Amino acid sequence: MKASELRGKDQAALQKELNDLLKAQFGLRMQSATQQLGNTSQLKKVRRDIARVKTVMNTKEAK
């Protein structure tokens, strides 16, 4: 996911995206804890996507 894609979305869509990413992160953490996660780089990607969404949300609020 790119920041340019996120900037085109409204606040409600960004909030939904954030909730989806947080749920995905929880699922990945549970898989990791039970040794079922094969590709551990997914955790890093999801964490960075969450940070991107939060950054775009904060910049939109500041304007």
Image: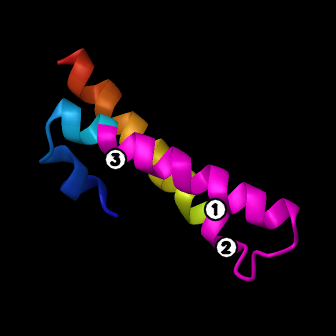
Which mark is drawn over residue 44? 1
Residue 14 percent across, percent down from the top left: 27, 40
Q: Is residue 32 above or below residue 3?
A: below
Which mark is drawn over residue 41? 2
Q: Is residue 32 left or right of residue 1?
A: right
Quadrant in which residue 16 is drawn: top left
**Are circles 1 and 2 on residues that touch, CB within 8 Å?**
yes
The mark lying in front, picked from 3 and 2, is 3
Q: Residue at x 67, y 62 (%)?
A: 28
Q: Is residue 36 left or right of residue 52?
A: right
50 is within the stretch colored magenta: no
Q: Quadrant of the image for the N terminus?
A: bottom left
Which amino acid, mark 1?
A: Lys
Q: Which residues are magenta?
A: 16-43
Separation of residues labelled 3 and 2 (CA atoms): 20 Å
Which amino acid, mark 2?
A: Ser
Residue 35 percent across, percent down from the top left: 87, 72
- Which secondary structure lies at badge 2? helix
Would you name the residue on which mark 3 appears? Answer: 17
Count of labels shown? 3
- Which secondary structure lies at badge 3? helix
Q: Main secondary structure of the magenta part?
A: helix
Quadrant in which residue 46 is drawn: bottom right
Give the residue at the far top of this rendering.
62
